[in-house]
Image (spheres, rainbow, N blue to C red):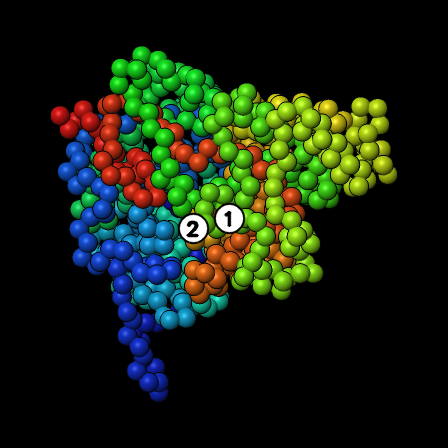
């Protein structure tokens, strides 16, 4: 399952209260205050607040944030344009997650939820007090409209909610979603994740009397039901959100102690270095540092030394997040179809040298698609995991059973030479050979040449050594860095040779796995199947993961899929630190106890100055 500010669906459903004259009495729905995909909810129905919030935090002050690139769209539905940072805070969803739980979600717009034992549908009962910013009530019609439009105009949501075959109003404040399969425990939960949009606003006219069109980009501030409204924008440059005093849900237990800043603003910068200098100068309040070298060498200025800026390295967000960060060759391109070519490209990456010289040893090599969690495979398969793989023995690489996955190790001249020699041999097995100083295809004479597409100059520092290493074995790799809008459009249409990709996994993998590496998403523009994976064994394992009925079986199936993905060398694994490196001025603060699986930023943070 994934974090969401958005999500969708269609029309047809169950009547939960109507009795057919000749039928027996229908089972009364069992209403719940939340859902847990596996196990039980940790908070009772009468909980007063989330355990990690400060209920007395002041509602005051400002939070100034930075972002890299630009934005040109405020419409969260469509796949075009770059949506402004933070736009999700103007919307509410049906349900809301606790960062203290891996599997639990609680009612927000919905006061209660009900589903049958076979999970073939789910019904939400909306809160009577839920209102849009203009005072109109949030209705089942709004929920239906939102699901339909998200599925119609977003490739991601169309894929993510592909099992939602119908959505219908089934009571004055009730809306029911029907699914095309049963016993998928995740489906009732994930349909609570999408942003609910105001149907009457999107179907109305703007201040100039022009009909709004949800299928197009817009810079008109949209209306929501959430805690903030858009107060002002400078297209591509800044956006400012303002806390709504009339927010309908401010006293809900799920919201107590949250949304504490009076204003939240984002300023866009050309690159990460410029953004960092703005933070140093005090015009930005908070920064999450993604550069280990900068973290090690450039946070020694006066404001850090005298305590005006606090530095923290927190593991909380990674306790339940498996990360794969990688260079991703696009197998829709002929040169990357052979697994030996992709494996050779991994042998050309000298992580150890890069980590020492550029990151001051602050990084770790990723070796799993679920890196850092109990879901990551290791060693050789055993027990139930082995049994699952044996069912697919003829469909997976044989080394899955014989050779634990490891990345090549460099760091000294001898190891680097051995790795490059191995890479050359793999290329040769795949039909490529060195002629002069170029790697060429034996049959066509075509040189091994490709473009690495990036969306920020900050990545170039890590990619340049890789390009230089490839050049040593006759492979020409070219870096091309483009602006955010162009990058988004090219990635959505799979118009690239290789990109820098990141997949963040939860501890409850499910339907999104099809979006990442399922055959049905390989040709769907806008999907996150960046590598172009279409593998029957992977498809089978995804289905097994989705329909597991207990945690032990789920873990075994995920580890089995992890092994198959690794053994096919679909990506060149990169690195991660395993920590959220954050720095913030003492104008802002967070509760003493942070949530188990996150840092709650910015929702549970507040203005320190305003508290005095």
Image x and y of residue 337, in percent: 72, 44
Looking at this view, name the residue that lies furthest to the bottom: 22
Residue at the spot x=32%, y=72% of the render? 16
Residue 178 found in image quarter: bottom left
User: Horizontal placement of 331 versus 145: left or right?
Assistant: right
Q: Give the number of marks.
A: 2
**In the image, which disc is placed on residue 507?**
2
**In the image, which disc is placed on residue 376?**
1
Pointer 1 local density, CA inside 10 Å: few below 14, some 14–19, many at least 20: many
Examine the rendering and report whether any part of residue 129 can be seen. yes
Q: Kindly report the distance in space between the C-alpha atoms of the residues bearing marks 2 and 1.
A: 10 Å
Image x and y of residue 230, in percent: 31, 33
The front one of 461 and 245 is 461
User: Horizontal placement of 481 versus 152: left or right?
Assistant: right
- Residue 263, above or below 337: above
Residue at the spot x=30%, y=39% of the render? 600
User: Horizontal placement of 429 versus 521: left or right?
Assistant: right
The front one of 437 and 124 is 437
Residue 274 found in image quarter: top left
Give yes or no for contact between labels 2 and 1 (Cβ–Cβ under 8 Å): no
Examine the rendering and report whether any part of residue 515 can be seen. no
- Residue 240, above or below 320: above
Image x and y of residue 75, in percent: 42, 39
């Amino acid at each position: 399952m994934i974090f969401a500010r958005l999500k969708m669906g269609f029309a047809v459903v169950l009547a939960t209260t109507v009795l057919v004259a000749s039928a027996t009495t229908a089972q009364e729905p069992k209403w719940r205050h939340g859902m847990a995909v596996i196990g039980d909810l940790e908070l009772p129905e009468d909980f007063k607040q989330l355990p990690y919030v400060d209920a007395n935090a002041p509602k005051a002050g400002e939070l100034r944030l930075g972002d890299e690139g630009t934005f040109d769209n405020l419409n969260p539905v469509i796949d075009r344009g770059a949506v402004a940072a933070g736009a999700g805070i103007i919307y509410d969803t049906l349900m809301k997650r606790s960062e203290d739980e891996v599997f639990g979600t609680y009612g927000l717009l919905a006061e209660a939820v009900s589903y049958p034992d076979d999970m073939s549908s789910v019904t939400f009962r909306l809160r009577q007090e839920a209102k849009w910013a203009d005072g109109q009530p949030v209705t089942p019609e709004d929920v239906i409209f939102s699901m339909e439009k998200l599925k119609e105009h977003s490739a991601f949501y169309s894929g993510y909610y592909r099992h939602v075959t119908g959505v219908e109003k089934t009571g004055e404040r009730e809306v029911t979603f029907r699914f095309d399969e049963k016993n998928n425990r995740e489906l009732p939960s994930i349909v609570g994740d999408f942003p609910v949009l105001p149907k009457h606003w999107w179907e109305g006219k703007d201040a100039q009397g022009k009909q709004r069109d949800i299928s197009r980009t817009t810079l008109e501030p949209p209306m929501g039901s959430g805690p903030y409204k858009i107060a002002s924008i400078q297209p591509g440059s800044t956006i400012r959100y303002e806390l709504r005093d009339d927010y309908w849900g401010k006293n809900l237990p799920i919201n107590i102690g949250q949304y504490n800043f009076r204003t939240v603003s984002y300023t866009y910068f050309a690159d990460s270095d410029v953004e960092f200098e703005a933070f140093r100068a005090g015009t930005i309040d908070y920064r999450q540092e993604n550069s280990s070298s900068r973290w090690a060498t450039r946070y020694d200025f006066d404001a850090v030394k005298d305590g005006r800026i606090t530095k923290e390295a927190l593991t909380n967000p990674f306790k339940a997040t498996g990360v794969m960060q990688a260079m991703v060759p696009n197998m829709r391109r002929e040169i990357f179809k052979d697994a030996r070519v992709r494996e050779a490209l991994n042998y050309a990456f000298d992580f150890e040298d890069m980590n020492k010289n550029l990151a001051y040893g602050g990084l770790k090599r990723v070796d799993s698609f679920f890196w850092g969690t109990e879901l990551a495979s290791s060693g050789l398969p055993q027990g139930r995991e082995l049994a699952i793989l044996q069912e697919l023995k003829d469909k997976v690489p044989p080394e899955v059973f014989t050779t634990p996955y490891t990345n090549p190790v460099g760091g000294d001249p001898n190891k680097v030479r051995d790795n490059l020699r191995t890479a050359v041999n793999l290329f040769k097995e795949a039909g490529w050979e060195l002629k002069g100083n170029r790697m060429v295809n034996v049959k066509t004479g075509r040189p091994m040449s490709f473009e690495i597409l990036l969306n920020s100059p900050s990545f170039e520092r890590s990619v340049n050594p890789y390009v230089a290493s490839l050049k040593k074995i006759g492979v020409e790799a070219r870096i091309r860095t483009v602006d955010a809008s162009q990058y988004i459009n090219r990635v959505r249409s799979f118009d690239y040779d290789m990109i820098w990709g990141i997949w963040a996994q939860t501890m409850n993998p499910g339907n999104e796995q099809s979006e990442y590496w399922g055959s049905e998403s390989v040709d769907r523009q806008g999907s996150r199947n960046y590598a172009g994976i279409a593998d029957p064994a992977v498809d089978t394992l995804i289905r097994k993961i989705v329909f597991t009925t207990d945690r032990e079986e789920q873990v075994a199936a995920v580890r089995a899929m992890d092994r198959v993905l690794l053994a096919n060398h679909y990506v060149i694994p990169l690195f991660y630190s395993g920590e959220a490196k954050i720095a913030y001025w003492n104008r802002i603060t967070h509760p003493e106890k942070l949530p188990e699986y996150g840092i709650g930023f910015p929702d549970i943070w507040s203005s320190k100055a305003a508290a005095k």
